[in-house]
Image: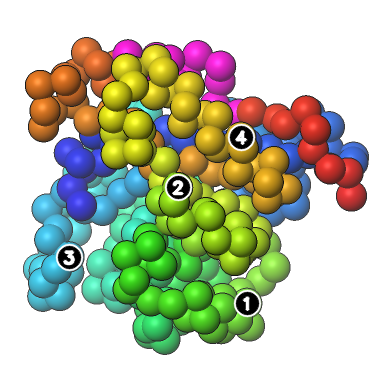
Amino acid sequence: MSIMRMACWLAVLAFVFMPIRGFGQQADQRFPLFAYLTGKPTPLMMTYTPSQLDPRQEVNQRLLKTSSIRADLAALRPTFDGLILYGYHEACTPRIVAVAKELKYRAVILAIWDPKSAAETDGAAELARQYEKDFALGILVGNEGITFKRYELEDLTIAADRLRKKLSKTVALSTSEPLVGYKSDFIVGFGDFLAPNIHPVFDRPQLDADKAAAWARAETLALAKRAKKPVLLKETGFPHAGMDIYTPATQKAFWAAYLKPGLLTRSDDAPHA
């Protein structure tokens, strides 16, 4: 996935915070990632895969130049201070994280594309150990693999158990599915927070930019209330091209509407613990 596609789909995220007793309106200290997302300065994260990488060919992971990664991350850094990745590869992901540290990114959500891969799971765990003091960290165990049948629910459990044995308790775990995937109680209950991909372009194509933004936020809040845990809206937005109805102007309108209520929503009926 290229930076161009990232710009189409997701630049910033909504975090629906379910406060517990003692936190009130303060930053949530349960995990460093939660503190980053609910604290100051306002967090801004970008989902990221190197713009010059085609991950379908493994050799491309090694052919990718570090200078290309640096150019990407330097271009993003004036606006964004956090990265959300899609998978781990030993020839590429450590370089991304190392450059992100040099450029003073504040948070990285690592990812495992194939939870059945012990090498990928262990690689993500090792990076988390290496950079625990440098970033607010999370790990996504899989991306849309249940919905599109790349792996099974048990594979998520096995990978999460393997991770937990290797990680400190400061690293929050989740998985990511499109909205339809959250019909599953297992997916809703998995991990420390939810990280859905909610695309009005696919699920509500008849909505204009303002209504699409409102729908995405409403679905996110509904998930938070159901799960009783924080929800990070990982992917949403309007593309800026591809069909006549999608233009830079409609993309701008979507984000203006989406951001107007603010990035952080605190549920009024959060449970107390």
Residue occupying the far bottom of the picture: 118
| Amino acid at circle 2 | Leu
Query: Residue at coordinates 88% horizontally, 44% vertically from top-left?
Result: 272
Tags 1 and 4 in contact by the CB under 8 Å rule?
no
| Amino acid at circle 4 | Leu
**Along the viewing direction, whichever of 240 and 69 lies nearer the viewer:** 240
Residue 179: give its label. 2
Q: In the displayed structure, would residue 36 be above or below residue 85?
A: above
203 left or right, relative to 65: right
Regarding residue 215, the answer to whether it shows in the image is yes
Q: How is the rendered protein coloured?
A: rainbow
- Which x, y percent locates residue 257? 43, 15
Q: Nearer the viewer, mark 1 or mark 2?
A: 2
**Image quarter for residue 152?**
bottom left
Asked if residue 153 lies in the magenta stretch, the reply is no
Q: Which residue is mark 1?
A: 164
| Amino acid at circle 3 | Pro
* Element carrying mark 1: helix
* Element carrying mark 4: helix
